[in-house]
Image (tube, rainbow, N blue to C red):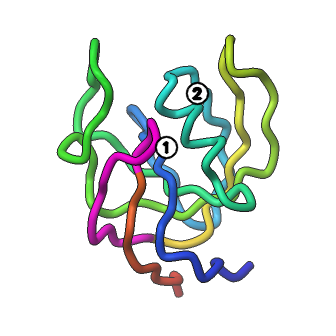
Amino acid sequence: METPLFTNYPVIPLQNAVLFPGVTIPIGISRPQSIATLHAAKENWVAIVAQKQIVEGREIGPDDLYRIGTIGKVERKVGNDKTGYQLLVRGISRIFLHSLHAQAGHLEAEGWTRNDV
C-alpha cells in the first residue's frame, strides 16, 4: 500500500509500545487529545509516535515524543468519544518528523516518509 501524499499527519502518542511498518496492532485511546486526533485524521491516516516517558496529569507536548514514528492506517475503530476507542492500526511506512505543533486540541506532525526495503 502506498503512503498518501499528505505532508501533515495528526499524531497519536503511544505509551510503552512501538508500531513498525508492516505490522498491525490494537491501540486503545481514551485521552481527549488522542480522540481529537482520530477525528482530525484524513481518510484514517495518522502518525503513530512513541512517547519518551509516560506523562501524567497534563497533555502531551512535542518535547514528549520521539522524532521518528510510523504512518498508520486505522483499519477499524470501535467505541465512542465518552468511553474511548479501540483501534486496529496497520503500520505503512516510517515518518521522520520535521516539526510537531498543537492544532485544534491535538498534535500535528509535519515530515517526510520513507518506505522500508
Which residue in the structure is indicated by mark 1? 12
Q: Nearer the viewer, residue 53 or 59?
A: 59
**Mark 1 burial class by Cα count in 10 Å: few <14, some 14-19, many 20+:** many
Q: Position of residue 51 (x, y in %)?
A: 31, 40
Quadrant assignment, res 63: top left
Query: What is the C-alpha distance between the residues marked 1 and 2?
Result: 9 Å
Which residue lies under the disc numbered 2? 29
Task: Specify whether 53 is left or right of 112.
Answer: left
Q: Position of residue 67 (x, y in %)?
A: 27, 61
Residue under the point 61% across and 27% down: 28
Q: Which contiguous range is marked in magenta?
A: 95-107
Kindly state the secondary structure of the residue where label 2 is placed.
Answer: strand
Look at 61% across and 61% down and name the residue there: 91
Q: Earlier in the sequence, mark 1 or mark 2?
A: 1
Give the prevailing secondary structure in the magenta stretch.
strand
Amino acid bearing label 1: Ile
Q: Residues within 10 Å of mark 2 (few under 14, many from 20)?
A: many
